[in-house]
Amino acid sequence: MNLTLFLSNVQYVLLYISEGCDPVNKLYYFDMSELPNGMESFRNKSTLLPFVKLIDNFDAQYHDIANDGTLFTFLTNKDAPKYKLVRVDLREPTVWSEVLQESENDVLESACAVNGNQLIVSYLSDVKYILQVRDLETGLLLHQLPIDIGTVDEVSARRKDSVVFISFTSFLTPRIIYQCDLRTNIPDMKIFREIVVPGFDRSEFQVKQVFVTSKDGTKIPIFIVAKKDIRLDGSHPCLLYGYGGFNISLTPYFAVSRIVLTRHLGTVFCIANIRGGGEYGEEWHKAGSLANKQNCFDDFISAAEYLVSTGYTQPRKLCIEGGSNGGLLIGACINQRPDLFGCALAHVGVMDMLRFHKFTIGHAWTTDYGCSDKEKEFHWLIKYSPLHNVRRPWEQQPDKSIQYPSTMLLTADHDDRVVPLHSLKLLATMQYVLCTSLENSPQTNPIIGRIDCKSGHGAGRPTQKMIDEAADRYSFMAKMLDAQWID
C-alpha cells in the first residue's frame, strides 16, 4: 500500500492511498483551519491526524485538480475508462457532478488549473497529444493550442499564473519548452527554450503512423521512423519496440541512440502501441492484462508481420526490444514465433511468471498478471511464461530449419524491482535446452546475457553507464542483423 500526502492549499491536506498497480486509489482529507494551532497541535504527540474519508474503496482513480473552499475538482476514471473531470462539495460528499464529460475516442491525460478560472487539458488522440484551454467552472472549450505530433511531458503553472510553460518532445524534436501567454484574446504560444542536437537534421527523416490488424481484428497503431524516401524492398534493418502493460502509454519521444541507428545503420525504428498500455484508456489496458495477456503478444507479432509483409524489413533483419514488462513481451514472442525475428533485446524482463510475486515488489504486479497461487490464474500464466515455454523449434517443425533469434538478456546485479534471477534463469534454461544439452545443436545464433554491475532497474544511472549499455546492445544488434555503417 502506498500513501501520498498532498497539500491542496494552505487549508486542506489530501491523502491518496493506492494498492497494487491498477489506476485506483482511496482519498481522505482534513481541514487544517479546524485546528487551532495548525500542525503544531500534533507536535510530540501520537494522536492520529483527523482525516475524513471522502473515497474509501479501490474502485477508481481520483486526482485533485483545483478547489475553491470546499468545492473540489477531480480527474477520475470512475465510470469513465477514458477519464473525465468531476466536482464535489465536501459539505455534500455524496453529490458529484460532471465538469468535463468523458470523450468518446480520446483519453483525458491531464488537467492543470491556470489563469484563475481556466484549465489547460491534454488529450491522447490515437497516441498523439492534443492541448486545449477550457473554462474551469463549466468545462467549455475556449481554445485549441497549436502543437506538432508528439508528447506533452508537462504543463507547469500555478492557478494564479497567466503564463504557462509546456514541455514537448517528438521522434524528431529533442525538447521544446513553450511559453503560452493566456492574457491575450488568442493564447500566444512561442518557444522559450529548445534543445539543439549538433549535426541532427530532422528533414532527413520521416515519421508515419499506421494501423495494423491483430489476430482478433483489433486495430493496433504503429509509429514508423525512417529515412526519407526509403525503398520498401525488405533490405532494411528494423528495430521494433513495445511494452504493453500497467496502463503505460508509449508516446513519441526523441532518443539520440535511435536517431544514430536510423541515420548511420539505415535502421527503421518502430513503436507498437499494443494492448495492455493506456493509449486508449482503461479498456485498452484491461484488454492486455490478466486472462487477456496473450493479446499483447498477438498484437506485437502482428506488428512484426506487417513490417515484413510491407517490405520494411525481413525476419533475419528484424530486431525486437522491450524492458521490464516489455522484457516479458520479448521473451514470450521469441518463444511463440522464433522464426519471425533475427535478434531480440530483453531488458530486465519478468521471465518467471509462476514465482514473480515472491520477490521484492512483485506481489504488486498481480493486478496486471494474476497470481499462480490461484489455480485459474496459474493456467493463464503457464501458457506464456517465458521461462516455462522454451522449446526446440526444430523439433516442433522438423520440416523447417528454425532456431531462436540471436538474443541478449540484459539485467543488473542490484535490480530490486525485477530481480536478476528472472533473466539469469531464462538465460540458463535457453542455453541448456537449445545448446549445451545437445551435440551439434541447430541453435547457432548466440544466446547471451549482459549483467550491469552496481546498477538497478534502469532509472538514475550515470550517463556513461547508459552510453555503455546502448553501445553494447545496439552493436550486438548490428552484428546479428548484418547492418553496415553509413557515414
Image (spheres, rainbow, N blue to C red):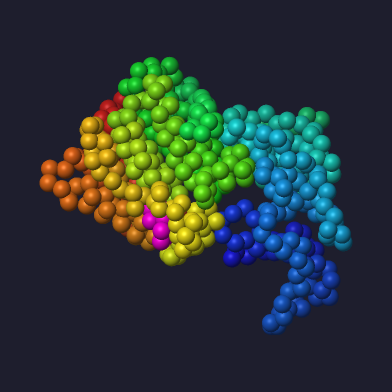
Where in the figure is residue 139, as x and y percent of width and height?
A: 80, 40
**Picture residue at 31% right of the left edge, 34% below the top:** 339
* In the image: residue 169, left or right of residue 455: right
Q: Quadrant of the N terminus?
A: bottom right
Where in the figure is residue 383, as x and y percent of width and height?
A: 40, 49
**Picture residue at 45% right of the left edge, 31% below the top:** 303
Q: Which of 451 and 376 is in front in this view?
A: 376
Q: Is residue 145 above or below residue 68?
A: above
**Picture residue at 43% right of the left edge, 65% below the top:** 358
Q: Nearer the viewer, residue 68 or 194?
A: 68
Residue most extreme to the left: 439
Q: Is residue 432 above or below residue 44?
A: above
**How many numbered marks have been drawn onto this rendered protein structure?**
0
Q: Which of 230 and 330 is in front in this view?
A: 330
Where in the figure is residue 68, as x and y percent of width and height?
A: 84, 54
* Magenta residues, start to end: 349-356
Q: Is residue 362 visible to the viewer in this orientation of the structure?
A: no
Residue most extreme to the right: 91
Q: Is residue 284 visible to the viewer in this orientation of the structure?
A: yes
Residue 24, located in which quarter of the rendered image? bottom right
Q: Quadrant of the C terminus?
A: top left
* In the image: residue 163, left or right of residue 18: right
Where in the figure is residue 479, as x and y percent of width and height?
A: 25, 35
Q: Which of 165 and 297 is in front in this view?
A: 297
Residue 166, located in which quarter of the rendered image? top right
Q: In this view, does 213 lie above or below 61?
A: above
| 421 falls in the magenta region | no
Q: Is the magenta stretch mostly helix, strand or loop?
A: loop
**Picture residue at 31% right of the left edge, 53% below the top:** 426
